[in-house]
Image (cartoon, coloured by chain):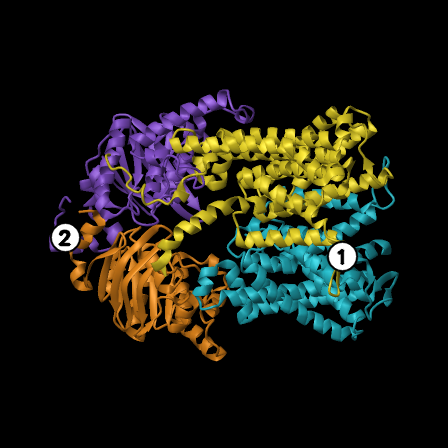
Amino acid sequence: MLKVEQLHVGYGSLEVLHGISFDVPEGAIVAILGSNGAGKTTLMRALSGLIPIKSGKIDFAGKAVGRLVAEKRLREGLALVPEGRDLFGSLTVRENLLMGAYTRRSRTEIEQDIERILERFPRLKTRLQAHAASLSGGEGQMLAIGRALMSHPRLLLLDEPSHGLAPIIVETVFEVIEQLNREEGLTIVLVEQNAHQALEVAHTAYILQSGSIVLNGEATTLTANSAVQELYMGG
Amino acid sequence: MSAFLQVVIAGLVTGSLYGLLTLGIVLIYRTTGVLNFAYGAIASLCACFMYILLTGPRLNFWIALVLTLLFSLLLGIVLERGFARPVLHAPVFTKAIATLALALVLETIAQAIWPQLAEVQHFSTPFEGQALHLGGVYLSAIDIVILVVTASLMLVLNLFLMHTRMGIAMRAMADNIPATRLMGASVGRIFMLVWALSSFLAAICGILLAGQSNLINVQFMDPILLPAFIGAVLGGLDSLPGSLIGGILVGLVSNLLAYFLAGHMLGAVDMSNPAIRDTLIFVGFVIVLLIRPQGLRGRALLRRV
Amino acid sequence: MTEVVPARSLLEIHKLTVRFGGLVAINELDLQIAEGEIFALVGPNGAGKTTVLNCISGLIKPAAGNIQFEGRELLSLPAHKRASLGIGRTFQQLQLFSSMTVLDNLLTARHTQLQAGILSGMLPFGRSKREDAHARQQAMETLTLLGLESYAQRRAGSLPFGAQKLIGVARALVLHPRLVLLDEPAAGVPPQEVQELATRLRFWQKELGTTLLLIEHNMRLVQAVADRVCVLDYGSKLAEGDPKTVLSDPAVLEAYLGRGASKAVQQEGVSHVEG
Amino acid sequence: MTQKPAVDQELAPDVVAQPELTGKKTLGGRLASQRVWLGCIAGILALILLPMLSDLIFGGSSDFQLHHISLIGIFILAALAQNILTGYAAQPSLGNAAFFGVSAYVLTWLSSDLGQPYWIGILAAVVVSALLGLIVGTPALRISGAHLAVATLGLVTTVGALLNFWDTTAGRQNYDLSNLPDFLNDDRTLYYFIFAIVVCLLFLSYHLLHSRVGRAWIAIRDNETAAEAFGINLTKYKLQAFVISAAMTGLAGSLYATWATTASSSMSSADQTIAFLAMIVVGGLGSLTGSILGAIFVGFLPLLLGQLPSPMVIGSFQLQISTLITGIYGLLLLLVLIFFPSGLSSLGTQAGNWLQRKPSKGGTE
């Protein structure tokens, strides 16, 4: 569904990603793992169109999207849940969800979707009129995911969903990710530092180090792989 | 007592005009980061346009009004494309200087095509000379119009920003531009709408001010730009009701000061001179700013538009 | 965990607590850094590592606790006074004075060593020029020591990223500080050059007698240079000691790889191999 | 430790710093600094010879032309002052016109009303401006960005209104500066007097900007966080920039009153502020040459446009030239902000870069 080939991305004279290639089949959860500074967020920003790519190809559902602006990529069905969530702090929870549905027209369908999302994230229901800035970390992550779902994406990009969350909440977030994939068949690309948790939900995984993919394979085989640990801990 | 009441009402009217100006200033500042010192010139250009429609082709007041408002929307779009977009990524200060330059250009253009407006001209409205007497308090028709228009514009604007898709998107953009793009919203289109909307507000304010004094020339907005900005900064530059309140406050204080200072002399200094009043307001403003650098109503306090 | 007790502490952090809004970024952290050692502060994203550095250099005011440098209380001093005590630092985002030449960057870092004010600065002779000449000579010596002398007259912002990184270090070292705080020196450095960076860090420590406190994500570098390591997680100390022991600690593995990670590893029976 | 940076050959010459910013260590640097010296000497010679040249060209009216050129000298001082504050120490203040106006009034008051010697007047004007700078600078440190811009612009118009109020209260049309030393009544000596001051201050500023103080300002502009971490007292240096800038603007203001032999409340107006800003933005923020170029640009404009007939008729449009000048200031300022955000002083380097970069640009997109 998503095919990335030889992607080079950088800021000014600094190149952060040195030719990344990977494949995301429809209906899969693909994890991209790496420690801080590996280039994970840069990858996500490049995939969603927030920063331009230097060279390489991004094909989404058979269409080249690598040169499209962020707004157009969303309309193609590529939604990003950014690192640090990037909620609209001065807007209410409900308004954040409405913003997620910006590209859609039917008021009734939007209302139905808000209902569905509130069912999935009951915590948000009680806080519907609260300002997003007042949400706790876990609630904020739920809202960020919910907001992205409002656009009916075909592929969801998640940038460090566990960032800054307490361990118990991280587990809930990952449960939600798994559910979305299982129940709604949503294709998901997940970027994480929290390797273990990500590998538990992912089908395949790629390991990113200093802007290059150094290892990839089935999530189950990577879980126990000492190489993962070595890469993280310097071995 | 009724004299005092009269002053308060006059203050509210002046304040409403300032408040209308601050609305447009804050709208642009919050969403696009441009501190628009050309705002007075935009208002004055629109009012002059209307004056020309009224005196040249001798159009009916209401037809001229509609045409002027359409003109103001167009002007906003042209300014966004031709001016705001090229300087979009410049630092706030550079953008502020650019708007000062824009003001000069707009005033020159107005003077070049309408040389008669270099001098003060009479601006007539259907409300001219009409007034209401309410138990000793005198209310001119235009003052009532100003109060009603301000209140209803504030209401409509609030409804627009709180409940429409575009309105919510504008507020979202004030929070976080990249995230707004991630929602599929075209930032360029919203910028354009913001500029159109704010020059629409400027046009209304310019027409009301010209209607109130029945006088107009190219620079007639200059003296009220600073009080409007002071109001906007007092309101915290980040919320529309805050700025409206800031504007009204400046108008009220200004009228009250004029009332209390009238006829007083300090040595040889005539305290009733507008220069003294404006100085006192400015000094008060700086003191407020020093105590609360974020404005009277802080960012923390006011999240709602 | 073997605790290496330092003979003499250069920097002592005691019950340091930092809050951002309601969030506790650092929670009662204790650290002792001995004179002349290389101390690494590691931990997953958001663990509060840079916050510790910012407290030491005075860019953040902690809610509680104290920091002593050579027995002197730091927290009561404004940020600009701390540099003159002999604390230099680099930044994760470099933060060079990008419009200046490399040499001027170093001269600016020596700001506290110079005294010339406005009046003498205006004159083409006298104290200001004498001071500057001396400072320039010392800055050149530092650049030469780090092999960067050919960059001296270049504009810092126009240099390639790698060079800018080294200029950042040179700027921190030009004052011959007692303590240098390094914020992720290996970030953005290609993997094949990490070993070389390690050699350099050792060299500065030996040659200049500088104590180094570094934050790092690249564990290869940490293993290669650090005398001691402290792992932070959620603002608290998770483990401290020599790198080999600490980095194979199950709790540390969990912090990095997620819950259950150490179990998986242990089940597979993988032991840690020195890289 | 043996790795030498291997990038020398790859770096385009544009990364070599401007000669004026560097020391005199390298051969290139020495040559460059010799060029700077030659340039300075040529400039001073040109200034000395200009009156004679002007005689040749304009004949009888040459003193009138010289008089205009002297104004450019005053503008250079004002531009330099604004540039130190805004271009170097990065304080976004729109308030310098206030010092410009106040100093002119101080000088005129002391000299015309109190009958004090001219030199005392100048000294007092500069001191009062410096004090005002201190008074304005202290709160300015607490106020940031957009708020500071509004507050300082407010200062300018408020001061202008007060000066105007003083004029009305005293019942005078023009506030004329009498009591000038004789030699300043002569356009030619006035020209030499003003340019002697300009050259002197340029010289002192050049050294100041390359001293510890100047480096601290630039450091604050480039990166406040790092500046603070390396021991630069932000408050002190920002305040010093305010005071120096105010004193210098004060000198420019009192020279302007001398030049015009009158003080006017329009010296402290939004238009005056725009003129100062136009000079440094057109010339180049943070550049000495930029201040000079900008002042020449803004100062010559009226001279050039003054040759046009007024009012000018284009088709059905009729234009007062004085209006046009303001509009052209504005337009040029806008165009420069949009197309040359780093100003005229960078045009030379930019052209060089463009020529050098062109071949290698090929495959980036």
- Please tell me whether residue B109 is drawn above or below residue D224 in the rendered image: below
Residue at the location (15% across, 62% down)?
A221
The percent position of residue C253, horizontal first and vertical second, equals: 22, 49
* Colour chosen for chain D: yellow
| Residues at marks 2 and 1, CA–CA distance in whole angstroms | 81 Å
- Please tell me whether residue B248 is drawn above or below residue D349 in the rendered image: below
The answer to which of A114 and D351 lies nearer the viewer is: D351
Q: Amino acid at mark 2?
A: Gln
Quarter of the picture containing the N terminus of chain A is bottom left
Q: Is residue C89 left or right of residue D301?
A: left
Check chain identity for marks 2 and 1: say if they share one.
no
The percent position of residue B81, horizontal first and vertical second, equals: 56, 64
Which chain letter goes with mark 1? B
Q: Amino acid at mark 1?
A: Phe
* Colour chosen for chain A: orange
Q: Is residue C143 left or right of residue D69?
A: left
Which chain letter goes with mark 2? C
- Please tell me whether residue C209 is drawn above or below residue B254 in the rendered image: above
Q: Which residue is mark 1?
A: B220
Q: Is residue D95 left or right of residue D42?
A: right
* Colour chosen for chain B: cyan
Q: Secondary structure at mark 1?
A: loop
The answer to which of D231 and B267 lies nearer the viewer is: D231
Q: Secondary structure at mark 2?
A: helix
The percent position of residue D61, horizontal first and vertical second, equals: 75, 39
Residue at the location (47% across, 41% down)?
D222
Q: Which residue is mark 2?
A: C266
* Colour chosen for chain C: purple
Quarter-of-image position of residue C5: top left
